[in-house]
Image: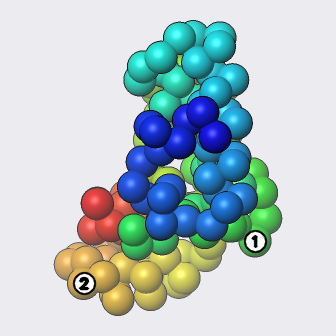
Amino acid sequence: MPAGDEMPSTLQRSGKKAQRTWSKAHDSAVETYGEGERAHRTAFSALKHTHEKVGDHWEPKDTPGPSDDRAANPNARKGKGETAGGVDVKGHSREELYERAKKLGVRGRSKMTKMELGQAIARKQG
């Protein structure tokens, strides 16, 4: 995989499908945009449609699609809207996100919205 040298450690700890998805998207983005941050962002955007960050690795989603409202919005390229940093807010209920936050020791979780829970989980996962 040409992108293998640049593959983030969270992907190195993930399954082959996640690695292939990121690598193919990254290589294509490098051809289009050149090396750099934009290629990485593009690759992660593609990965987030099929996988979700759980702890220190990426796991396949039950249902492919955007993970949050920002990922679903075509204006996301302009940096507008909130993101949950790879946590699949759209694919999980508030209760599921609450339980994940509880396991991670997120404080104040009982008053958080789904998006806030997703963001807190993303921060805790690093």
Residue, x 53% and y 42% (percent of image)? 4
Residue, x 77% and y 57% (percent of image)? 64
Q: Earlier in the sequence, mark 2 or mark 1?
A: 1
Q: Nearer the viewer, residue 94 or 56?
A: 56
Q: Nearer the viewer, residue 126 or 17?
A: 17
Q: Nearer the viewer, residue 82 or 38?
A: 38
Query: What kind of residue is marked 2?
Result: Gly
In the image, 67: left or right of 97? right
Q: Residues within 10 Å of mark 1 (few under 14, many from 20)?
A: few
Query: What kind of residue is marked 1?
Result: Asp
Residue, x 75% and y 71% (percent of image)? 62
Q: Quadrant of residue 75?
A: top right
Question: From what the image shows, is residue 67 above or below residue 121?
Answer: above
**SS label for mark 1:** loop
| The label number, if any, that marks residue 116 in the structure image | none
Q: Quadrant of the C terminus?
A: bottom left
**Which residue was labeled with disc 1?**
62
Q: Residue furthest left?
A: 107
In the image, 1: left or right of 7? right
Question: From what the image shows, is residue 68 above or below residue 10?
Answer: above
**Which residue was labeled with disc 2?**
105
Tell me, yes or no, if residue 55 can be seen here. yes
Residue 10 placement (x, y as % from top left): 43, 59
Q: Nearer the viewer, residue 115 or 10?
A: 10
Q: Quadrant of the N terminus?
A: top right
**SS label for mark 2:** loop
Q: Quadrant of residue 63?
A: bottom right
Residue 23 placement (x, y as % from top left): 63, 40
